[in-house]
Amino acid sequence: MQELLKGESPPDIYWSRVNCDEAATDILSPLCWSYWRNGIEWGTRAGWSKIGLLSPAQVMIPQAPSERIVNCFYGRMAINVHTTCRLMGAVPGASPEDIERDLLGSVRTDAPTIEPMRIPKGRLALKGITNVIRHTTTVRRLHAEQFAWWSHIVANEPASSDLRLYLDESLSRFCQAMEVHTVSRTFVLGAQARLSAATRKAGRPDLFLSIFSGFGGVVETDLAHRIWEIRTHRKEPGPFLARYGFHGIHEGNLTGRSWRECPSSIFTDYTVQSTDSPAALATRAAAAHADSMRELKNFLSRRERASVYALCRFAAVHIRNSELTKEMCLMAIDAARLGARRVGRQLEEQGIIDDVEDVFMCTWDELRPEVPPHELSAQLHFRRSRMEEYRGIEIPIAFKGMPTVLEKSEPSVLPGEGLQGIAAASGRTIGRARVLTAPNQRFTPGDVLVCRVCDPSWTPVIMLAAGLVIDVGGTASHAAIIARELGIPCVIGTRDGTKRILTNTLVHVDGDGGVVRPVDDLDGI
């Protein structure tokens, strides 16, 4: 039987799951992996080609795992750290170390020196400047087109004969979304690296997080505010679902369920309301950003001041763009999810599969009409058993070569000295920890949310939290961005916070120092 989800790697290639675990929060099915592999390899390379990091001839899926951007190990995606750092480290203002810090949460002490890829300066300058000028207009146009397409798809049943063509279109649109998302994300990382360097040079690195916050206009702030209005003022949820229904639990997995399918997960599971609206929280975060900018100004020359203000404007624009392009990806995934289940119904009616959900055990190419049905059905039981087997194991967040399979560990006690993570959103808070494994579980406003990973479907919970403690992620993760925009202290990249912090433990979250520790004596804080 064909093994699709275990993966393979040369022994010297270093991989990281940090960004991938946020993109797809559940074990990948064969259909999901073949969808993501094509989208990332084609779309990401096309985005890098667009800004001059690659030539058009390099936009392809390499045969060798060592040359790929992404791979799948035991049903989990991981990024090739060396390849990504070499390419994105060539972005003006960034370095391979900056990219590794984003991918891993820190730079390895034993990391080999990674030289940025040599790129013709003329190509990089010409394409980079051209795309800086055009990118925002392009993102808004493509986002509007993608939203109109998604709205039409979920409202209309395609003809049975058109389903395969429709699935191919969703993959094509996913690749396009990944292309513009890659450009946005690359611009954000470049601005983030330069702003961080500017605050260090000024002798005020403590101001970086508050300066890299409160930009306003991020789409998730609107999402959070609309949910708050529905819960607080009992507004009709229809318009909200028409705009944001592509989000949902495990929204990056084709096997997930979006809000348009299961709206109860956001409207009926929270009975206690937050007193502050997300719009009010965002206003306070913007005020804190302005205060920090005024403070930093005293440590900068006139030229440095102009550069920092320009970098902040640039970062604000492309953080907003990156959240819109992320929405474009999720719209394509939700449309593919819907189409795959419709194909599954066809195959079930034809007796080829036993259940609609078995369609997710197929690969993308196997859903084409020319694949003999008997060859398709013979693989499904084996693949489902493998997928469930992988769900019961753990592998490291970062690893070299093939990952070591780990047994799932039991929760332990948070040590008195605390837990070190990454400082992701400024501020300090004390609250009772609430460890959640899914965003539709019960949560009390004012508690500290402790979870393994966050995607946009966690926004209904994030907006209620006094602080965030997250196992997996970095400063460019969704949870970190929304926390900074709402002024919620956040420590991310704790690796095992969900195993070390027990629900109802009183904890102190230091979003500036990146430390979470238990509180026994309030006077000691």
Image: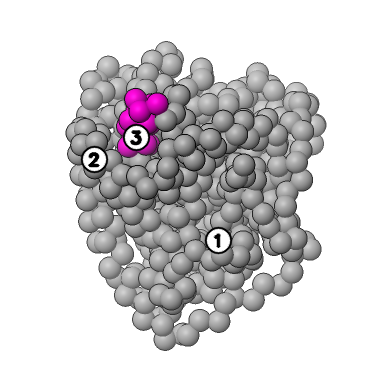
Query: CA separation, marks 1 and 2?
Result: 35 Å
State the CA–CA distance, disc 3 to disc 2.
10 Å
Residue type at tag 2: Ser
- Helix, strand or loop at label 2? It is helix
Residue at the spot x=22%, y=29% of the render? 239
Pick whichever, 304 or 73, lies toward us: 73
Under mark 3, the amino acid is Val
Sequence order check: which comes first, mark 1 or mark 3? Answer: 1
Report x, y in % for residue 45: 45, 65
Q: Judge from the rendering whether residue 65 lies leftward or rightward of residue 483; answer left or right.
A: right
Mark 3 crowd level (few <14, some 14–19, many ≥20, 10 Å Cα): some
Image check: 220 left or right of 194? left
The answer to whether 444 is drawn above or below residue 129 in the figure is above
> Which residue position holds label 3?
343
Mark 2 highlights which residue?
161
Tag count in the figure?
3
What segment carries the magenta color?
337-351
Q: Which mark is residue 69?
A: 1
